[in-house]
Image: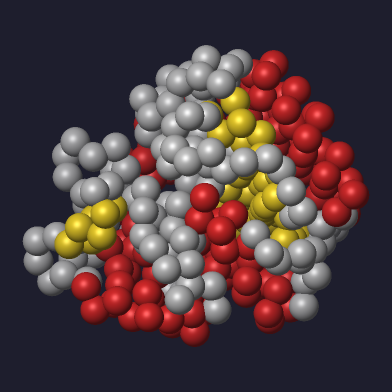
């Protein structure tokens, strides 16, 4: 089974300051762990291409996209919201991050690889149709999903988000789109704070209380997600892979362990094998304890690769 690994050096040039949790060291930790574990030798490494304006406009408000380009600074920084900053290299990093998911879709749909992992930043799942927030400028996974719908005629895409934070942006973009099933497990209450409400139509919510452990996480997926996936029968499975639900992470208070990440990845791969011809795209979202992040991504990727 061939797995693509998409990233770009510019994603590490997006510098938000020494004390900012969304740091270049996140990607360094992942790559160092993959090299140390000799997993990189089995991956098809590709430099991420840039998303085009047309690809971004297919998902986001074109005026919003234009405003991001217009605000990109040559020096200093621009504050899009209190958590989301643009530095001189931020725009290119964001274009590579969204472009990596488009590229992964192309590689998979053309039969070049079976599945893919996009090791990119800034993350994307908080970015709404016309709004940056929560470290996110463009909604990377949504841009890729829209590309699959528009360019390849995929009729059913499932996006599963196990970040500690609710992926409000992805939900808002696809809330009325019957071709996309969006499912999110998340700590509540926690950023972005408003109660997203009950599951409905093509949206599955799996809120978890502060301090929830692996057994709580697994129970939610068994009762809520997997029946929904079996009914939906996705043709492409996409994962918003946030690793900040791990017990070591400073951004939340869930208590997942590495074996919980392996468990959910195995279960999702089983779904993909039954319904998607094994087509899976995993996209990095959160994860801010670099040691835990490196270990968990290694295990997640190894499980996707079925090694």
User: Looking at this rendering, what residue extends furthest in the left direction?
Assistant: 76
In the rendered image, which quarter is residue 30 located in? top left
Give the image location of residue 164, x and y in percent: 51, 33
Judging from the image, the colouring scheme is secondary structure
Q: Name the residue located 22 percent from the left edge and 71 percent from the top edge.
A: 72
Q: Report whether 208 appears left or right of 137.
A: right
| Number of marks drawn | 0
On screen, residue 251 above or below 68: above
Nearer-the-camera pick, 27 or 79:
79
Most extreme residue toward the bottom is: 54
**Closer-to-camera residue (285/259):** 285
Which of the pair 303/145 is nearer the observer?
A: 145
Q: Position of residue 78 (x, y in %)?
A: 17, 62
Quadrant occupied by the C terminus:
top right
Res. 207 visible in picture = yes
Q: Position of residue 3 (x, y in %)?
A: 65, 54
56 horizontally vs 94: left or right: right
Asked if residue 81 is positioned above or below residue 53 in the image, the reply reads above
* Residue at 45% in and 52% down: 126
Camera sees residue 120: no
Left or right of 246 on screen, residue 65: left
Residue at 72% x, 61% y: name it.
180
* Residue drawn at 56 percent across, 21 percent down: 209
Question: Percent x, y for residue 265?
Answer: 70, 37
Q: Is residue 247 above or below residue 286?
A: above
On screen, 225 above or below 152? above
**Could you say which is closer to the camera, residue 181 or residue 36?**
181
């Amino acid at each position: 089974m061939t797995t693509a690994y998409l990233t770009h050096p510019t994603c590490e040039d997006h510098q938000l300051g020494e004390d900012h949790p969304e740091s270049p060291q996140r990607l360094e930790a992942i790559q160092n762990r993959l090299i140390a574990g000799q997993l990189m030798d089995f991956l098809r490494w590709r430099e991420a291409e840039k998303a085009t304006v047309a690809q971004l406009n297919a998902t986001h408000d074109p005026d919003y996209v234009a405003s991001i380009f217009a605000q990109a600074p040559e020096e200093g920084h621009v504050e899009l919201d209190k958590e989301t900053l643009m530095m001189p290299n931020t725009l290119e990093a964001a274009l590579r991050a969204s472009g990596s998911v488009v590229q992964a879709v192309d590689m998979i749909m053309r039969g070049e690889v079976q599945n893919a992992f996009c090791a990119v930043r800034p993350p994307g799942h908080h970015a709404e149709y016309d709004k940056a927030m929560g470290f996110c400028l463009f909604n990377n996974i949504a841009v890729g999903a829209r590309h699959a719908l528009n360019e390849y005629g995929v009729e059913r895409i499932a996006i599963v988000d196990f970040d500690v934070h609710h992926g409000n942006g992805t939900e808002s973009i696809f809330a009325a789109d019957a071709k996309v099933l969006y499912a999110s497990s998340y700590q509540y209450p926690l950023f972005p704070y408003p109660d997203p409400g009950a599951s409905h139509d093509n949206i599955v919510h799996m809120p978890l209380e502060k301090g929830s452990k692996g057994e709580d996480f697994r129970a939610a997926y068994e009762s809520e997600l997997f029946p929904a996936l079996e009914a939906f029968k996705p043709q492409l499975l996409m994962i918003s892979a946030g690793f900040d639900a791990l017990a070591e992470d400073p951004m939340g208070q869930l208590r997942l362990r590495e074996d919980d990440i392996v468990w959910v990845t195995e279960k999702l791969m089983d779904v993909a094998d039954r319904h998607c011809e094994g087509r899976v795209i995993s996209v990095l979202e959160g994860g801010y304890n670099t040691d835990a992040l490196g270990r968990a991504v290694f295990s997640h990727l190894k499980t996707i690769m079925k090694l």
